[in-house]
Amino acid sequence: MCKKIFVGATGQHCGKTTISLSLMHLAQKKYKRVGFMKPLGPKWIEFNGTIVDKDAAMFSTVFGVEEDVTLMSPVTLTPGTTRRFLDGEIDSVGPIKSIRAACAELEKKYDYLIIEGAGHGGVGSVVGMNNAQVAAELNAPVLLVTGGGIGNVIDAVELNLALYQREGADVRIIMANKLVKEKRADTLAYLQKAFAGSGMMVTSAFDYLPTLADPTLQHVSELLGLPLHGGTTERSRLCHTIQLGAASSQIVIDHLETSTLLIVTSSRDELLVTASALHHIPEYKARLAGLIIAGHVPVSSITQRILDDSNIPYIRIKETSSEIFYQLREHVSKIGPEDIEKINLINSIAERYIDFDAIDAMI
């Protein structure tokens, strides 16, 4: 018999995918066959000739189960799906039938199945299958991931619980994530007090780690929709800091932090040449992950030759440096299959912080 767990969340960016990756890693130490499913895919891509959710594609690649990817992502919300559903062009029970059928097939193949929801409890309501409905339909006990904090977490849990309870879904675990390290013990103690007597297990996952929110060079390339030039073998490198190269070249270089993505105006020849030269020095290569060269002014031919010869990773964009700086600062990075550094970090931390046996006992 296949054990199932539905990983939901109280909102976006709580860390559902990180927790799902952790559970996959930990479950594989106890169960022979561990599977993954993303019933409703709001963010789709073309993968191996078919349209699937991005997370399903990532899990299938990381865990080597590409042959199951269509079962892992039975329903995707492609452009126009919402309107077609509301206009009656899509069978109202078709999506949930597809989800049930896919889950049944996965249960035959796996001993333990992790089912990841999409956003907060109500996501998917427009097509008649929000997270609470899906969890209830699949008869999967729910682990609800929250952010850090106390009051805001309690409020968010109560709001989501109302929907899960209305739909008859069984929320058994509340997992606080992205905790402030110094407040971790106190936060968990107060959350356990708040939900004492509810029958739900209250536990914790990761402390807040900026590294897990930092984008890779590949993420930045995809976000901007532009190619990464130069050292493309470094596309999985994390960018811990985004810095605007507005000061003199010497000041900019002196203030580089570890693995900085530097935004430079295309007319700043001296800074572009200096950065290119420093790319060959290990000390500075560790501090400078790559460049975004911004602006309408063409890079001079000699500077372009120096850039190309240095093999420093860079992206060329027409927007101004200030525009791209604020766009990237607002970006929240997601995990992709190429993010080996992040995935290995997640797995190692999960082994220290997540009590899988206790979670497993609750389902």
Image: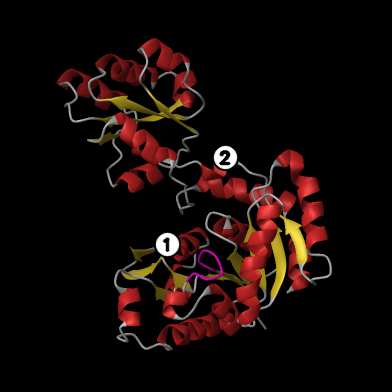
Q: Main secondary structure of the magenta part?
A: loop
Q: Quadrant of residue 329?
A: top left
> At 35% across and 75% down in the image, what residue appears?
82
Q: Residue at x 47, y 84 (%)?
A: 96
* The C terminus lies in quadrant: bottom right
Q: Quadrant of the N terminus?
A: bottom right
Task: Look at label 1 and name its amino acid.
Answer: Lys
| Mark 2 burial class by Cα count in 10 Å: few <14, some 14-19, many 20+ | few
Location of residue 1 with respect to 43 vertically, above or below = below
Image vertical order of residue 338 relative to residue 182, above or below? below
Q: Secondary structure at mark 1?
A: helix
Is 64 in front, or is 118? 118
Say whether residue 342 is left or right of residue 50. Answer: right
- In this rendering, does residue 32 appear at all? no
Question: Relative to the observer, which residue lies in front, 311 or 342?
Answer: 342
Residue 118 showing in the rendered view: yes
Residue 122 located within the stretch drawn in magenta: yes
* Mark 1, residue position: 54
Magenta part of the chain: 117-123
Image quadrant in which you'd find residue 196: bottom right
Mark 2, residue position: 210
Q: Is residue 1 left or right of residue 313?
A: right
User: Tag 2's secondary structure?
Assistant: helix
- Whether 278 is among the magenta residues is no
- Horizontal relation, residue 102 to residue 262: left or right: right
Question: Where's residue 351, x and y in %?
Answer: 71, 52
Q: Position of residue 288 (x, y in %)?
A: 43, 26
